[in-house]
Image (cartoon, helix red, strand yellow):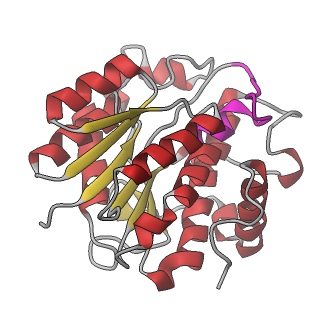
């Protein structure tokens, strides 16, 4: 496999760190992004990668991150792996005016992808890989009039909405940029035994942080291998652009909102407005 330049967010722990180790061993150039300076630096030093720190709860830090990454991407960017995210506790608004879960899991990656679109499409064959979840099917239901879940908040629903947002974003990217050579996919890595949901008050916390996890979860290395597969995959050969995968196969059961073309466009425009873009990254073809 040719050496690729890869930006990997959420790289300081869990499947991100596991994938970083494998991708580095395969000889790729990695630019790792994490929220914790100490943990991100430790993984980067272990695998011989560059590292950057940003808190996705602050969009200004995403803009600063993108500027720093662009300075390091003279030869273009082959893959942007939007892997950062999580499920959280009580409803909280960010300083940017967005519900915390939605911003960290979707709006920040939406903005970062836009700001890195030039290096992604410079060679006519970049890819955007988004770590989503089957929670999109079970818990997600986006309401355009209440994207911040002010009316009926639960940490589980907020997470399901955000993971559904990842899939809608993938569809939007495909529709707008596939003709320029960009591939976009979202995938569920499996139910992985990491510190995921540790800050949540959701029932999911009990599945991940009690003895039940031995029965219900896979290891971070197994989940990381699914992320590695997506990142190293070639659009049109290993996976199809615009599609949501359950681990390594197209998901058989989808949230009906995934197939709503009108919603894909409305949500794209709403996301662009929330991150301060006058128009989204690209117009629908």
Q: Residue at x 35, y 53 (%)?
A: 247
Quadrant position of the C terminus in the picture: bottom right
Q: Residue at x 22, y 38 (%)?
A: 49
Q: Between 132 and 104, which is closer to the camera in this rendering?
A: 104
**106 w.r.t. 257: above or below:** above
- Give the percent coordinates (x, y) of residue 176: 59, 77
- Residue 231 in magenta? no
**52 w.r.t. 232: above or below:** above
Q: Residue at x 11, y 52 (%)?
A: 27
Q: What is the span of residues highlighted in magenta in the rendered image?
A: 90-105
> To which quarter of the image does residue 190 belong?
top left
Quadrant position of the N terminus in the picture: bottom left
> Does any portion of residue 133 appear in the rendered image?
no
Tell whether 218 sits left or right of 195.
left
> To which quarter of the image does residue 262 belong?
bottom right
Q: Between 75 and 210, which is closer to the camera in this rendering?
A: 75
> Does any portion of residue 121 appear in the rendered image?
yes
Tell whether 199 sits left or right of 248.
right
Q: Residue at x 80, y 34 (%)?
A: 97
- Give the percent coordinates (x, y) of residue 265: 73, 70
Q: Residue furthest top?
A: 210
- Residue 102 in magenta? yes
- Circle count: 0
Q: Main secondary structure of the magenta part?
A: loop
- Give the percent coordinates (x, y) of residue 74: 32, 60
């Amino acid at each position: 496999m040719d050496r690729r330049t890869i930006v990997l967010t959420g790289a300081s722990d869990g499947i991100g760190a596991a994938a970083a180790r494998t991708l580095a061993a395969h000889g790729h150039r990695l630019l790792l992004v994490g929220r914790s300076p100490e943990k991100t630096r430790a993984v980067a030093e272990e695998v011989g990668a560059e590292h950057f720190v940003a808190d996705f709860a602050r969009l200004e830090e995403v803009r600063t991150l993108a500027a720093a990454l662009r300075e390091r991407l003279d030869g273009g960017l082959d893959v942007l792996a939007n892997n950062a995210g999580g499920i959280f506790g009580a409803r909280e608004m960010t300083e940017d005016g967005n519900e915390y879960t939605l911003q960290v899991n979707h709006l920040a990656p939406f903005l970062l992808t836009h700001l890195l679109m030039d290096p992604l499409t410079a060679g006519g064959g970049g890819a955007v890989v988004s770590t989503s979840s089957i929670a999109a099917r079970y818990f997600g239901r986006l309401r355009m009039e209440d994207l911040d879940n002010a009316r009926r908040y639960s940490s589980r629903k907020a997470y399901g909405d955000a993971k559904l947002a990842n899939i809608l974003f993938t569809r939007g990217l495909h529709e707008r940029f596939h003709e320029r050579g960009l591939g976009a996919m979202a995938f569920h890595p499996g139910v992985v035994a990491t510190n995921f949901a540790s800050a949540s008050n959701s029932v999911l916390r009990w599945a991940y942080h009690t003895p039940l996890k031995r029965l219900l979860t896979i290891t971070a290395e197994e989940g990381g291998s699914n992320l590695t597969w997506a990142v190293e995959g070639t659009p049109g050969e290993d996976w199809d652009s615009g599609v949501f995968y359950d681990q390594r196969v197209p998901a058989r059961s989808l949230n009906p909102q995934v197939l709503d073309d009108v919603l894909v466009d409305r949500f794209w425009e709403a996301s662009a407005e929330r991150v301060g873009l006058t128009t989204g990254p690209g117009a629908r073809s």
